[in-house]
Image: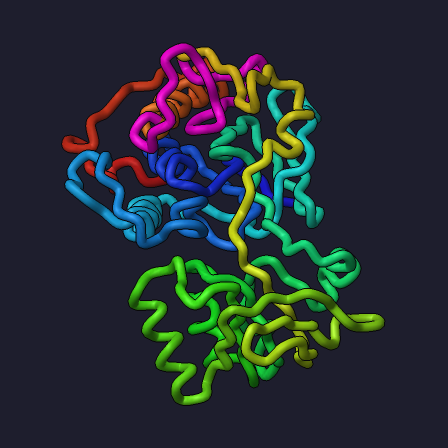
Amino acid sequence: MIKTDIAIIGAGPCGLFTVFEAGLLKLKCHLIDALPQAGGQLTEIYPKKPIYDIPGYPSILAGDLVTNLMEQIEPFKPTFTLGERAEKIERIEEKLFEITTTDGSIIHAPVIAIAGGLGSFEPRKPPLPNIEQFEKKGVDYMVKDPEKYRDKKILIAGGGDSALDWTIELANVASEVTLIHRRTSFRGALDSVDKVMDLAAVKKVNLITEAQAIGLVGNEKLEEVEVKSKTNGVFNQKVDYFIPLFGLSPKLGPIADWGLSIDRSAIEVDTKDYSTGVPGIYAIGDINTYEGKLKLILCGFHEGTIAMQSAFKYIYPDQKLSFKYTTVAGVNGFES
């Protein structure tokens, strides 16, 4: 069981910056995210996309913004539960929540900050009739630990950044890596495309374009993927793992069952402090809604800042909170 001051559901940019603001108040944070790494959409969907509305940066790549945020919060030593979705929340004491994840992890905290973006992201699954039969038995929708695939035969499907990046990464880990894509052109970064082409040229990656998986074969676990290729027709590829990487689809998920006020798949909040109707629970970033709401990272940073000031008063109602400028105290002056 993990004990913390602030449990942050969502490790995207708004959740990460909230760690910084909480740290200035000597509040410890633990972040929970269904994705296997911090950064939310910025890391998973468009790490190479330039962002133009972050103050002080005329332009910054989404992945670089996440790197900077992680460096910014490092002094406050946040902890993470990644690759697990927050499934259940219940109040076990007047000022204590218990969060249970899909994998059974337990987190206790007096305050919850929901920074879930557009909701929990679920993988877009290929339309194969028996795919659920092989989930966790050879079919993986995301890569949590590359070592799992060491010396294994891997088939990756997809044409975006995730498919390209993991093809490059696993080429040095797996015994055999095959990448299939429905088209001849890729949606990912040109540098990644070039690297995959280079790996294919030296036979470190088996690249098959204009092809797609049409069936899965196996008994207790996945053994083969049936592939339809414009060039080679239909054939069966022997595999240990099939990793379809077709992006993520946002869904509100279990948040809808947590007793919060929901309006069109967003959590209604009080703009005084971005609190929900449940004492001790705040919602910041794209997951919340209020009159005049703008879905910008910049606005989420502001919401997290105000929410943490309120959270401190909620946890320590008898302590005086004196606001300090970081230009005066520095970050070290706030570290606990």
Residue 203 in picture, x, y percent from top left: 45, 88
Give the side of residue 278 with respect to residue 72, left or right.
right
| 59 over 140 or under it: above or below | above
> Residue at coordinates 38% horizontally, 27% vertically from top-left?
295
The answer to whether any part of residue 7 appears in the image is: no
Residue 171 in picture, x, y percent from top left: 47, 79
Residue 77 in picture, x, y percent from top left: 40, 48
Q: Nearer the viewer, residue 179 or 332?
A: 179
> Residue at coordinates 33% horizontally, 33% vertically from top-left?
297
Q: Nearer the viewer, residue 25 or 65?
A: 65
| 237 over 81 or under it: above or below | below
The answer to whether any part of residue 271 appears in the image is: yes
Quadrant of the frame with the C terminus = top left
Give the side of residue 12 with respect to residue 177, left or right.
left
Give the side of residue 306 with respect to residue 101, left or right.
left
Colour basis: rainbow
Q: Is residue 32 magenta?
A: no
Q: Which of the 4 quarters of the picture holds residue 313? A: top left
| 121 over 25 or under it: above or below | below
| 298 over 274 or under it: above or below | below
Range of magenta residues: 273-299
Q: Nearer the viewer, residue 99 or 142?
A: 142
> Residue at coordinates 59% horizontally, 50% vertically from top-left?
123
Q: Is residue 292 magenta?
A: yes
Residue at the right extreme, as displayed: 219
Quadrant of the frame with the N terminus = top right
> Residue at coordinates 43% horizontally, 41% vertically from top-left?
12
Residue 271 in picture, x, y percent from top left: 41, 12
